[in-house]
Image: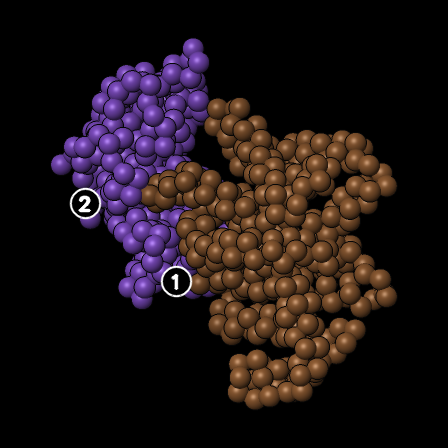
Amino acid sequence: MSVRTRPYLPLLSVLLLVGAALSALLFGRYAISINELCQFIQASSGVGDMPAGRYQLIHSLIIDARLPRVIAGVLVGAGLSVSGAAYQAVFRNPLVSPGLLGVLSGCAFGAALGVIWHLHPLPTALLACATGLLAVAVGMGIAHLFQAPSILLLVLGGIVANALFTSLLSIAQYMADPLDQLPSIVYWLLGSLSAVDQHALLLTGPVLAFAIVLLCLGGRAIDALSLSDDEAHSLGVPVRKIRVGVIILATLVCALTVSLAGMVGWVGLLVPHVARLLVGPGNARLLPVSGCLGGAFLLAADGVARSVSAGEIPLGIITELFGAVAFVLVLHRVRKGWL
Amino acid sequence: MTLLQADQLSYRLGDRLILDNLSFGIYSGDNIALLGANGAGKSTLLRILLGLLKPTTGRVLLAGQPLYGLSRRAVARQLAYVPQSHVPSFPFSVAHIVAQGRLPATGLGRAPAEADEQCARQALTELGIDHLRARPYTELSGGERQLVLIARAMVQRARVIILDEPITGLDYGHQLRLLGLLQRLAEQGLSVLSSSHRPEQALASANRVLVLHQGQLIADGPPRETIDSALMQRLYRVTLRQIDAAGHRFFVP
């Protein structure tokens, strides 16, 4: 039940995502035509056939090189956007984002430690998740130092946790070997899909997808927190359980995106605002639409990152550059709602 | 029938006694105005009656059952809350806000059905604000927002409705219509408890007043027998002249 019900918009966002994924598979330094893709799919399912050399080439391009990257891009974009929208709803604040609440810096600190301790990609990813959750726990702990933690205290606790983990990250960078480790930490901080590790993706991908779907299904419960806590309580809604559950789930999602692609900023703030402009604030529609738009946005940004120069520009730079400009435009439209 | 019973309620915050041993019952058909100066403990009492705050000692019984033994949903099916309206962060539609009144009945699990929307629509029509249905709640005036929250409480189908200063901030016409509505709800057998800063409101529309003074319940009875210039002097520390005329009571400085 949005303010202006436009039922075709969710469908449109799905189509946008599919289109973005398809073009990310086909375009690149070596373009593949849609015909060739169809032939390839027929050949690999044993229906049609294709010259062996050609088949090998396309197989290595699509399956080995591009598909993991596209899957990771969709999951990272959707994950950051859905968790951003969920954070905004449960904190009842349109300005919170995974970055602001210390989730991303907490994860990045864990990832930096992983680099310093020469861990493999998978333990590094797990460590990043653990420190991301720790950062949120620190933020919520700070809020709970005071008797009845208000929403504002939770947000402020998150900001303190962000500052704390940003400084821990700086310490880690300061201690890292400047020739060998520091560049890879910095590269991680800039965010990129080029280093997506297939084994890590096989393990974290399904968990990430599951958590994203779970958040989207919780839209109606999240809606119940849209007014004040007292009102939600008096409507029989278990406010604390929902809020804590959503925060843990959204943090897990963010942490997994960081473990896949490093710190990709702005997506979690920008995309939910765009989605809210399109389908209204009802979370049952907002969360899935945010997910689709986020996935498409990240693939587009990654496309730009891959193709602007011969070398690759880190993805995070593109999203922040685009995000900052786009956010000003969104603010212009959204102003009536909450400013 | 006793719908809500306050049983020796006290509430202490640090070394300050906010509420001091209050006992009273709320019955079907009651339209109660809760009077008291700023800081008398009105809001604390409302929060305790709603189960949002635990009393330091004493207990609240809802239809004979201890409030704290009941699940939140069970409480919400009998007890509705109309807070002072505020502007939320996100522009939910009026229909969305009102439909939330069905949550105690349906739970969070399932999507709203046709019957729920019908229910919301009926409440909006009854309050004469059906035309606001598709509008963003954030763009309404304070009075309209208050009416929307009352519509939500009606959709909740509770037997007790507790309102926190419902007429504050409303224009004169909205005030009178709202007071008339509360009277009608009480006549239908609900009980209505609203906190108020306006003794005239209590005299004009309530059928019972509860008076809180420094945490104590100093009066409980029909408005005409309870509110007089002596009470006004004690509560608000203002000297007023009392005029009884044409079946009404007025106060003038």
**Disc on res. B130:** 1
- In-image side of B210 versus A161 (left or right): left
Q: Colour of chain A?
A: brown
Which numbered disc flags the more N-terminal residue, 1 or 2? 1
- The residue sitting at 22% across, 23% down in the picture is B7
- The residue sitting at 70% across, 58% down in the picture is A193
Q: Residue A80 appears at what percent x and percent y?
A: 61, 53
Q: Say which residue label 2 marks.
A: B189
Amino acid identity at mark 1: Asp
The answer to whether the residues at label 1 and label 2 have Cβ atoms under 8 Å apart is: no
Q: From this viewpoint, which residue is outermost toward the top? A: B15
Q: Nearer the viewer, residue A48 or A237?
A: A48
Amino acid identity at mark 2: Gly
Q: Residue B93 appears at what percent x and percent y?
A: 47, 58
Q: Residue B195 appears at what percent x and percent y?
A: 36, 33
Q: Secondary structure at mark 2?
A: loop
Say if B118 sits above or below B180 in the image: below
Q: Indicate the quadrant containing the N terminus of chain B: top left, top right, bottom left or bottom right.
A: top left
Say if B132 sits above or below B215 in the image: below
Q: Nearer the viewer, residue B183 or B149?
A: B149
Q: Indicate the quadrant containing the C terminus of chain B: top left, top right, bottom left or bottom right.
A: top left
Q: Colour of chain B?
A: purple
How has the structure been colored for display?
by chain
**Disc on res. B19:** none
Say if A143 sits above or below B215 in the image: below
Return the chain for callout 1: B
- The residue sitting at 55% across, 44% down in the picture is A251
The quarter holding residue A182 reads top right
C-alpha distance separating marks 1 and 2: 25 Å
- In-image side of A218 versus A22 (left or right): left
Q: Residue A45 appears at what percent x and percent y?
A: 53, 81
